[in-house]
Amino acid sequence: IISFEDRDLTIRKGPYSSYNGKNTRDTGSYDKGHKHGEWINYGTTNDEQKIRRIENYYYGKLDGKFTENWPSQEIKEQGNYENGRKIGEWKLFYKDGKLAGKEIYDVYGKKSTVEYFFKDGSAAKYEDLFSKPSFDGGMQAFYRYLSSEMKYPKQAAKDRISGTVFIRFTVTKDGSVEDVEAIKSPDFDLSNEAIRIIEKSPKWIPGKDFGETLNVKYNMPIKFSLR
């Protein structure tokens, strides 16, 4: 449900709501075509609507209090934005409400002071609690794997087709790769080759969030070039 301020329906103004089937996904309002004021994002757990995030905007930029919740509705992350940048003290919490971290951001939106904690309250490092999936040996090892495995599709080579295939896949809790798909590509055969390479890749190091290993979606560009 969208409101507009002009007859051509190009400039949004007023209440906005979006839905996923019967469930509300987002509510908020626009002014002069920009998100403005409080916006709420919802998720659904066991057919029950839950608040995921509460954000505040000032003409399209995050500005004011921000809260992200766990599905249990316990606070996961909370702090303030100013002109699109995190500012001041931000706190991170485990699902049971225990403090996982404190981050202080300066006026430029950069972290100036940080503290992280394991569930027992002892000191932790950021990488102990949070990490993206990574290839064993790092990206240099991954690029070596790419160069050794890649087989340029014959028809694409004949037609002098090159470019970048953007791949999305899931790194599971045990490091295996699933649900590989090409989300943007210059050619069908290049897409298939990029998918084949990722599906065949050795196990990755899974990602972590608040110290727990998770199934994480990962996007990656794979470049095909003819010399």
Image: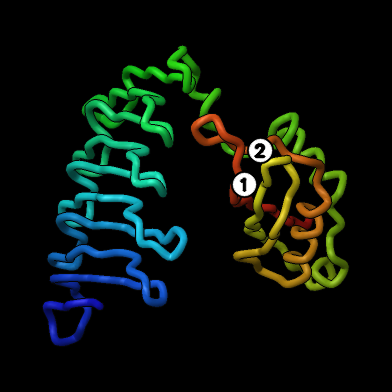
**Apparent side of residue 109 relative to residue 125 in the rendered image (left or right):** left
Question: Residue at 65% of width from left, 66% of height from top?
Answer: 185
Vertical position of residue 130 compared to residue 15: above or below? above
Which quadrant would the N terminus be assigned to in this image? bottom left
Q: Residue furthest bottom?
A: 7
Residue 202 horizontal/vertical position (percent): 81, 42
Numbered circle sitting on residue 215: 1
Numbered circle sitting on residue 65: none
**Apparent side of residue 196 relative to residue 130 in the rendered image (left or right):** right
Q: Are marks 1 and 2 in contact (CB under 8 Å)?
A: yes
**Apparent side of residue 201 relative to residue 46 in the rendered image (left or right):** right
**Apparent side of residue 62 relative to residue 164 in the rendered image (left or right):** left
Residue type, numbered disc 1: Asn
Question: Residue at 84% of width from left, 65% of height from top?
Answer: 153
Of labels 1 and 2, earlier in sequence is 2
Marks 1/2: CA–CA distance: 7 Å
Which image quarter: residue 91? top left
Residue type, numbered disc 2: Pro
Q: Residue furthest top?
A: 122
Residue 217 horizontal/vertical position (percent): 59, 51
Q: Secondary structure at mark 1?
A: loop
Question: Residue at 46% of width from left, 61% of height from top?
Answer: 46
Between 99 and 53, the residue placed more toward the observer is 99
Q: Residue under label 2, please give it.
A: 206
Question: Residue at 67% of width from left, 47% of height from top?
Answer: 171
Q: Secondary structure at mark 2?
A: loop
